[in-house]
Image (cartoon, rainbow, N blue to C red):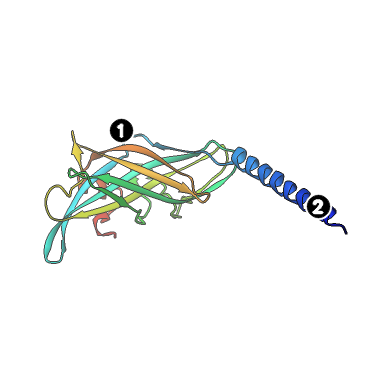
Amino acid sequence: MSDSLIKALTLAISVLAIVNGAMLLRSYLRDKPILEIQPVYPQTYQWFFRMPPGNFDSLPTRRYGFLIYISVRNRGIRDVSLCEWRLTLTTPGGKHFKLFPISIPQPQLKHADYLKTWPVLGIKGHTLEGDTMVRAGDAVAGFAYYVAEFYGTDDFNPLIRDGSVVATITVRGVYGRPVSARIALTEKTLDEVCQLIPNIDKIC
């Protein structure tokens, strides 16, 4: 085989590889999942609450719980599984704290003639699946629970304005494309939250 033929074949293979790669990239970009986050009933189910103080290195700590209820929608045409959903807080001192979810049982509230149950994102319960697979054109929803513990000055507290904490929820699918949304959490008492999840302050 002549050198010129070998060079021509090598060039043809390189061109085919580039074209194939471009087609795969185009297909991926066209078919990628497109996630959106929305709080579910934002005036009702997005809460923060104060818990009994803790202790760190013989110093008292201030403990807060954060309970959010979100929906994650997939506007793309490829299914995607969620692999991370974290909450980021801002303090009066301008610091940012990233919190990761803690497993909780399904929230429940007993009414006169029925038991209302809510899903927890990523947790399979007795009555609900807690799915993290978001099908194309579909959505999943669930509660997520986070705990933050601070000590030292009040600069290391959640920033509370007009009775609310504004936090950022960031969700990432297995394809590595994170999306974020801002959520305003209103304050509830520990007793109110414990009506849905008994002894939530002891879950860690």
Q: Which mark's residue is nearer the viewer, 2 or 1?
A: 2
Q: Which mark is residue 99?
A: none
Sooner in the amino-acid sequence: mark 2 or mark 1: 2
Residue at x 51%, y 51% (from the top left corner): 174
Position of 53 relative to 112 (above/below): below
Q: What residue sits right under mark 1 in the picture?
A: 43
Which quadrant of the structure image shows residue 76?
top right
Position of 71 relative to 152 (above/below): above
Q: Secondary structure at mark 1?
A: loop
Residue 183 lies, in percent from the top left, at 32, 37
Residue 200 lies, in percent from the top left, at 27, 54
Three-letter amino acid code at disc 2? Answer: Leu
Q: Nearer the viewer, residue 24 or 113?
A: 24
Residue at x 43%, y 40% (from the top left corner): 71
Residue that extends furthest to the right in the rendered view of this protein: 1
How far, Cα to Cα, is label 2 from label 1? 65 Å
Three-letter amino acid code at disc 1? Answer: Gln
Residue that extends furthest to the bottom in the rendered view of this protein: 57
Q: What residue sits right under mark 2 in the picture?
A: 9
